[in-house]
Amino acid sequence: MAAGSGGRDGGGTSERLALAGMLFAVSMTFIDQTIVSIAAPSIIRELGLPAGAMQWVVNAYLLALAAFFALGGRVSDILGHKRVMLVGTVVFVTASALCGAVPTGGAAEPWLISFRAVQGLGAALMFPAALAVVVEVFPVERRGRALALFFAVAGGLTAIGPILGGWLTSWTWRAIFWVNVPVAVVALVLTHLARIRNTPRPEPIDWPGAVLVAAGMGLSVLGLQQAAVWGWGSAATWGCIVGGLAVLALFVLAELRSRDPLITMQVFADRAFSADNAVLFFAMMSFVPVFFFASVYAQVALGYSANEAGLYLLVFFAGFGPASQIGGRILDRRGARPAMLLGTVVGAVGFAGWAAKITDLSLGAQWVWIVLAGAGIGLLLTPASTDAVNRAIGRSYGEVTGITQTVRNYSASVSLAVLGTVLLHTAANRITDTLEQRGLPPQAARNTAEQITKSLTGPSGGSGAGGVDAGLLAALRADFAAANRPVLYGMAAALAVALLCALWHPGTRITAEDEAARPRPGARPAGRESEREG
């Protein structure tokens, strides 16, 4: 019998092959979150793109990811997790190859932005399906350790992006897209060798719901992404955010009345599931944005190269990786609540300590706190994510994975927008004071400070402070370092709120017996009136 829910051929070998195949697949999506920014200057220079185009190259991918996660998860339950993972991988890698083949001239900008959006669609199909494959293949008593390895390796690859991007760009920036081709081939081969069983469920897709959630997520995330450009006082910013949230509210009302909803809202009646997602929402305010803020800080304040900034991020994963394994083992033995409680406390202490030492421009003064911050996130990420998936109604693993990934993605967008604004304003104020002390008139100092700050935090962050004397450069670096302090304190505060959410978790855990008593894939959950056998 093929590896999958209900039976495994080859036992551990099939499980390991399946896990490896899914890791290779999702590794492309994690690396792509950071690798493109490193190549931004080379892309702009060769293609002659306008200044704002590169921001849209980044945003198009993230927007599509946010808009289609929920649909991707539901489609994977209906068509089968293995099949949708394969389709998502092919869509993603094809779009990657086409991004690398972008022509020069006037077509370059729409070409690159369009195929980056297609990449995001492929990732939105692939990721929930790949995670659901791992959940199906591993029994519940060993699922925590398997997913701990999944999240540890996949998350660590985000830090590899800058290092790999710098090395590949030294050859050609197009290679940052082409590198996905051999990775995808390995993922497809391993998936075939694992002989994963595809388990489709012949159910209708709620297309009106899919349109509503895509429009709502897309609009609100667009508003958050563009807040730094349009300004928080802009009608466009708030029109997108409020309009998107209104559409999402309509989506919830429509789902409650739908015979075949895209998302079964009854799952939120499970207090543990809601607590897991609340923990993920606030914890991801710290985890996902830390790659951006720490990378820019390392390049600007510490004067690191892009490759060295990647190594700086690896310090975070020195805590994250081992702690993920510990969190997975705690989940398997004692449930999610103890791991989430421990993780939120350790993480909050780590981020607060990192904030206190951020102006000591030395890794030696910071590394202990960075490791603690990473360990805290590592302890809670797998337990919260796995416990939420374990509570799927009718074993709709793709559906609930789509929910958790949407929560994580939206949280990251909110955090990047809010904390990014805090960083910009704090840095601009401090740099303005420094320039005024050096004799610049107040308005000129303010204008110059804003230009410097935006150039430091743009797609090619770290290059905007060149051409100044050594004394002023040292002062600017100190100002930028200090501006990161409230950002890290904000991350610590987010984890403190996550701690309260973890305390709300009832502490119950899903056992193998509980899962065996649930309906098999194909059975409709209660509340879906058009129940079919199948």
Image (cartoon, rainbow, N blue to C red):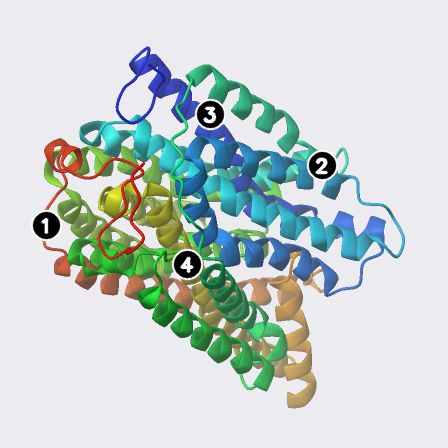
Name the amino acid type tagged 3: Gly
Task: Count neighbours of disc 2 (C-alpha within 10 A) and say few if under 14, some if 14 to 19, many if 20 or more.
Answer: many
Q: Nearer the viewer, residue 10 or 276?
A: 10
Which SS class for mark 3? helix
As measured in the structure, the alpha-carbon distance from the residue carrying label 1 to the one carrying label 4 is 36 Å
Residue that carries the numbered disc 3 in the rendered image? 21
Q: Nearer the viewer, mark 1 or mark 4?
A: 1
Residue located 79% across and 39% down the image: 101
As measured in the structure, the alpha-carbon distance from the residue carrying label 2 to the one carrying label 1 is 46 Å
Name the amino acid type tagged 1: Gly
Numbered mark located on residue 507 in the image: 1
Q: Mark 1 or mark 3: which comes first in sequence?
A: 3
Residue that carries the numbered disc 2 in the rendered image? 97
Numbered mark located on residue 294 in the image: none
Q: Mark 3 or mark 2: which comes first in sequence?
A: 3
Name the amino acid type tagged 4: Ile
Check whether the beta carbons of the residues at disc 1 and disc 4 lie within 8 A of each other. no
Task: Count neighbours of disc 1 (C-alpha within 10 A) and say few if under 14, some if 14 to 19, many if 20 or more.
Answer: some
As measured in the structure, the alpha-carbon distance from the residue carrying label 4 to the one carrying label 3 is 39 Å
Q: Position of residue 173 (x, y in %)?
A: 74, 40
Residue 482 seen in render: no
Check whether the beta carbons of the residues at disc 1 and disc 3 lie within 8 A of each other. no
Q: Position of residue 243 (x, y in %)?
A: 50, 78
Which SS class for mark 2? helix
Q: Mark 1 or mark 4: which comes first in sequence?
A: 4
Name the amino acid type tagged 2: Ala
Q: Position of residue 239 (x, y in %)?
A: 54, 81
Q: Mark 4 or mark 2: which comes first in sequence?
A: 2
Residue that carries the numbered disc 4 in the rendered image? 358
